[in-house]
Image (spheres, rainbow, N blue to C red):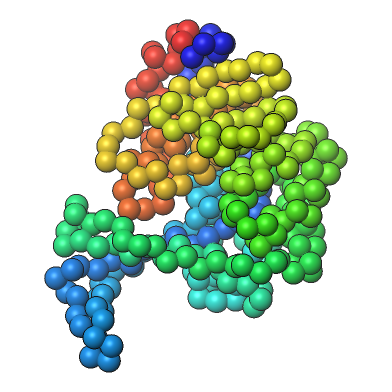
Amino acid sequence: MDGNKSQHFDIDQIICSLEKAEQSVITVFGDYSLDKYVYSKPSRDEQSVETGLTAYQIHETASYAGIGGTVANNLRSLGAQVICVGLLGHDGHGFELLERLGQIGAETELMIQSDRLLTNTYLKPMRGETKESTLEAGRLDFRNFKETPPELEEQLLINLEKAAARSQGVIITDQFLERNCSAVTDRVRNEVAGLALKNPDKFFYADSRGFIGEYRNVIRKCNEHELSGTDLTGLRIVTMGERGIMLYDGDEKTHIPSFPAKPPLDICGAGDATNAGIMLGLTLGLDKKEAALLGACTASVTIEQIGVTGTATREQIIARMYEKKHFFSVNL
């Protein structure tokens, strides 16, 4: 791309840094969800005696921690320690989400449950006679559309400060477009800016679908569609799908190429996987372009996993890095 810096990447350095991943402590703060898959076969559909409507016969379920949970999954899979801070309901989905986070070894003591909330849940009906033919049908979302109570905002901020004190980095996952109806409210964004300013030795990194221009004093990440019309300064990370990542740092622009992935592809959670790789790289001492390359590599592994919220292992990252070592070790 015109105007990009010519660069090379030290692949060996990136791979060696992963050996120290257990030394990184990263807080994942903000929105979490439960990604729940339910499987049925059209040949088993029945007609409801009561309503005459189709009754879909579920024979299998699977669930994964999503949004912040996807970031946590990938960080833990790569070896980092993770502290989770977010909101969930006193409901079955909340119980299941905490169970999934606990199974990967993430710390969940600072997660906040409330009977005034639903646990954000994406219920995904999967339809097909065979695994190969299974496709996702219309999704059912469990969401909160009332403003987050002030007392929950206060507790979130208290827990965030506790977690940040023990971390080298904080990732803010700001998922929803409705203002003030989730963990990351206007007040929370403002307080995050102040906390980042007070802790210049820590990395604060925000990924927001609808409010990226309102963040201050943090690394800001969005995709190219979310960037449209937003005037940003400082370090920005813009993901562009198969065209890679663009880093903007003042007047400097650096293009990070993507890693080729083998179809079929499922892009669910790709941005969260990118966030995990970038933040881990930064906390391990990589420079921003090499951290971004680690993020791109992490996403390329996860999108090859169909019908699940993908996770990349350290072994998969190392194998893919070595596979493309020559390409990324020369000037682009």
Kindly identify the residue that appears in the image at 75 percent across and 49 percent down. 189
Front one among 276 and 206: 206
The image quadrant of residue 119 is bottom right
> What percent of the width, then of the height, locates residue 110?
69, 61
**Residue 233 to residue 218: above or below:** above
- Decide which of 124, 305 is in the foreground and name it: 124
Residue reaching furthest to the left: 43
What residue is shown at x 73% (from left), y 42% (from top)? 214
For the image shown, how many numbered marks are present on the structure? 0
Residue in the foreground of this view, choosing between 114 and 190: 190
Residue 99 image offset from top left, x and y in percent: 51, 66
Outermost residue toward the bottom in this view? 50
Q: Is residue 274 above or below residue 250?
A: below
At a point 19% along the width and 75% down the height, the residue shown is 45
Front residue (pair 328, 148): 148
Can I make out residue 68 in this image?
Answer: yes
Left/right of residue 193 with respect to residue 220 in the rendered view:
right
Tell whether 248 sits left or right of 75.
right
Q: Is residue 93 left or right of residue 282?
A: left
Q: Is residue 149 above or below residue 33?
A: below
Q: Is residue 229 above or below residue 171?
A: above
Residue 254 position, x and y percent, is 57, 18
Relative side of 318 to 79, left or right:
left
Tell me which residue sits at (66%, 41%) in the image.
212
Task: Give percent across and percent down for residue 324.
Answer: 37, 20
Residue 20 seen from this side:
no
